[in-house]
Amino acid sequence: MPCERKPMRYGHSEGHTDVCFDDEGKCIVTCGSDGDVRIWESLDDDDPKSINVGEKVYSVALKNEKLVTAVSNNTVQIHTFPEGDPDGILTRFTTNANHVTFNSSGSRVAAGSSDFIVKIVEVVDSSQQKTLRGHDAPVLSVALDPSDEFLASSSCDGSVTVWSIESQTQVAQWKILQKSSDVSNAKSLCRLAWQPRSGKLLAIPVDLTIQLYDRNTWTHVSTLSDDLISQVVNVVVWSPCGKFLAAGTIGGNLLVWDVEAKLCIERQKHEKGFTVCGMAWHPSGGRIAYTDTEGCLGLLEGVPSPSSSSTAAAAKETNDYDNLFDEDDDRMLDEGMSDSRSPVKKPIMEDDDDDDDLMPATGRPRNRGSFLDDDDNSQDPGSVKLDGVPEEDGSSAILPAVGPAVSLPVYEGPMPTQPQRAFQPGSTPVHLMHRFMMWNSVGIVRGYNDDQDNAIDVEFHDTAIHHAMHLTNTLGHTMADLSQEAVLLVCEGTDELASKIQCLHFSCWDTHKDWIVDLPKGEDVRALCLGQGWAAVATSALMVRLFSVGGVQKEIFSLPGAVVCMAGHGEQLLIVCHRGTGFDGDQALGIQLLQLGHKRRQVIHGEPLPLSRKSYLAWMGFTAEGTPCCIDSEGVVRMLNRTLGNMWTPVCNTRDSCKSKSDHYWVVGVHENPQQLRCIPCKGARYPPTLPRPAVAVLPFNLPYCQTTTEKGQMEEQYWRSMLFQNHYGFLSSNGYEIDSEGQSRTEKEQQELLMKMFALSCKLEREFRCVELAEMMTHSVVTLAIRYASRSRRMALAQRLSELALEKASQFQEEEQEEEEPAYQRLNCTSFKEIKLLLNFVFQEYLINIFKLQVSGAGKSSSSPAGQPRTTNVLDSMTMSSRKPAPLGGTSKPGKAPVLKPLAPKPKSKVQCVAQIQMFSSPAGSHTLPKTGFQLWLEENRKSILADNPDFEEMDVIKEGMGRFRTLSAEERLNWTERAKGDSDPKKRKREDEGQVDEQMESDEGSTKKKKPLDTSAKLSAFAFNK
């Protein structure tokens, strides 16, 4: 008995619509382009309940009193049913979600979007999401199989893909659809459908037919067609029993097939011939609701059920062995699957000789790339084995019988990762109608491709560079880059036209400001970038082509693998390409860094690029100061450390600043001075919209050091972050760029202050060995301050080791000065500077000896210090002043700076200072000269004898030999030489230097009054005090 087609009725405004039934079949739920969801008690309901969920609704699904909709604001929303109260947002996309569907239990929702992404979201906890990536165009539809093991999706890229939900990997793909650029241009919605209960068959509408694929072997087993079909099939839907399949076409045809018999048992025609875009089968069977693109709702009554006589007769005519089993047997066999939903392995036929020994026993394709996830709930694809499929249980009458088979080995190792596609850093996906073609530190390039306009807008952050530009995109440019000299645009090639490179050289001084180059036929641009006076493009032929900014072709060279992205800054060219095949979700990327100046060289030779586990490269470029920097999909920011052998150091994790797992930061720039990561927050998406103009946020850098909640960990992180971000000064200076000298000095001062604070903290914790380690990183002037701090803390052993360290630093300082081949007069001053350092160390040793004597002799006398020890801080404080006073004698233009922080080229005024220092050093006794010590006086009188014994000695060797001989003298003899030195100096003309104060302390009596502390020393040390 033929079914009855009820008259259509108005449901929504003109446009795309969708329909479904509630769980009991009491209500019909529809949605439309008017943004409303309507609940109909019947087709004759004149007052349906209406729920407004947005501007447009593209899809609706209902299960367990949860109403899920795909709305035009790029969200998937959930409402209660039948109340219609909002219950939150399940997930977000960067563009519209085109289709949503529940699984059989209603615990999960799958959604496909125009940003090429498929998401699977848990209804109870929307933060539990799985993301499937791999389509190259917008997703048309999604379908979850009844066992909740696989998901099928169709896309505008012409493919239908089956995914494993647990491992998020691709298990099958068929290129059977016609390609299109967008859902609106697609010839069919290609609504997929799994067979209910067993899920053995997947129905796919392909042109004028419906193709059925078996889930055990992922092979095409049958095709359903009919002579009435004259236009493309749009929608398919299974009956609840799984024996019938209904379809709706573009031309308004409605057909029902008996799948087992492959017979079309029902044919109906839309009363106005409109496109059927939504279909739903009543839960109990017998009725089909459908909607069209004009917003109307219709109903088919009396659709055949399994008890129909026609169906029974058709079933009797089939003589397939599968009829030996009934539905109950099917159910028992389905329940026999393992708990992990991993079926038993099925042997392969002997005839499959073309497959190698590592072919999975399932017959599925081996090349299953693991697609990258963007949340913490994604599973490790390497942990999921390639299991087989269950043996035939006889539920389908379509599959042929198999003969004897031989079991082959199964590969259970890690699966290869699908290589990352090429992308342009700072741009949003190409399929978007309004997108950012480039956003960098120079400006913004926007692309518009809609019904009204196809144009490109160029906006500069600094209008002094150039005014804003509006370009007509007649060539269909898809990639762009922007510098302070030019705009570089690229369009893809077609069958008739070659790929073109267009450059708008707006800083050119002549009248012809643009040039165009056609690439060879079949060669397309995959990546591009601009530098200072040059442009580079990487092509599909694995080549990099260099051009001058004026259009002159320059060098070309080959790449070892497919390019991923490129970036340019000044004379630096950064290239990232594939090094090989990654496994278990990891990418295998290599990086090359080239210097394109006068001395062309390769700085990084294709070394591996470090990324987080199971992530891909999301952004690559340079900081504003020229340091390479990369960001992966997990939000980890890494910066090249030039002082550590070009290693990559993680400096930030943008995920730490995200409030939700679905939120991301889209990076637009990195700055080292000041330390800023400039990015755009994207709520529930990876890319920002073009309108309204997104606001730029600034994130701080934070190196992942241990125990950063403690004071020690915080200071360690601050110090090494400052050291890393200071490296650009040396690079810029060596390449002829101007640097901020004041900023560099301020950074060096902050570093030394942090070292001194860590030193003080270690002293408080009685970690003297750690104190020496910290002092090794200090400059010689800060080491002197550390000696004073150690003496104040009454840690004389530590002070002694620090004095030895100061001597070593002075020696290293002079060696570095000599390596720079400075003039003789400057080397003389450095020698004198070292002599002062040696004397400082010697006097300090002598002082410690006398302090020990005083402690022994004054043990019984009362004192303000503990254990009767005399106060020693005043003497050391005054002694260290000499390390500041004779600094001009050291022969450096920057006294107190560490050798590593010294400028590469000395300033001109340093020579004048050195000459003045020589004059000061060689001035007569009546001038302002430093007082001589006992050792200096002894060395002057014994220099000739030392040189007579060792005629080959240089000045430093003479001093070392003299120090050794002077130490062999008795204490009385050394004291006499000291007294003679004091008598030779004029106390009225000399300043209070450290050596003189040490001698006075050695002469003073135990009961002498306390001397006043220098105010400047107390002020310095007070900054490093710690509260007990």
Image: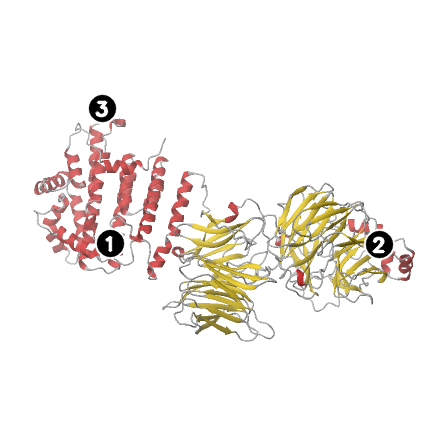
- Give how far across and how far down residue 954 sits, in percent: 17, 56
- Give how far across and how far down residue 702 sits, in percent: 45, 46
In front: mark 1 or mark 3? Answer: 1
Numbered label attached to residue 814: 1
Q: Nearer the viewer, residue 166 or 459?
A: 459
Amino acid type indicated by mark 2: Lys
Q: Is residue 122 among the parts visible in the rendering?
A: no
Chain-order first, disc 1 or disc 3: 1
Numbered label attached to residue 824: none
- Give how far across and how far down residue 1020 sits, in percent: 28, 38
Count of numbered badges drawn on the protein: 3
Q: Nearer the viewer, residue 812 or 89?
A: 89
- CA gap between label 2 and label 1 equals 100 Å
Characterize the local packing of mark 1: few (<14), some (14-19) or many (20 or more) Cα atoms within 10 angstroms: some
Numbered label attached to residue 6: 2
Amino acid type indicated by mark 3: Ser
Residue under label 3: 862
Chain-order first, disc 2 or disc 1: 2
- CA gap between label 1 and label 3 equals 46 Å
* Res 540 → quadrant: bottom right
Secondary-structure class at tag 2 = loop
Q: Is residue 698 among the parts visible in the rendering?
A: yes
Amino acid type indicated by mark 1: Gln
In front: mark 2 or mark 3? Answer: 2
- Give how far across and how far down residue 408 sits, in percent: 71, 62
Left or right: where 258 falls relative to 991 = right
Characterize the local packing of mark 3: few (<14), some (14-19) or many (20 or more) Cα atoms within 10 angstroms: few
Quadrant containing the C terminus in the rendered view: top left
Chain-order first, disc 2 or disc 3: 2
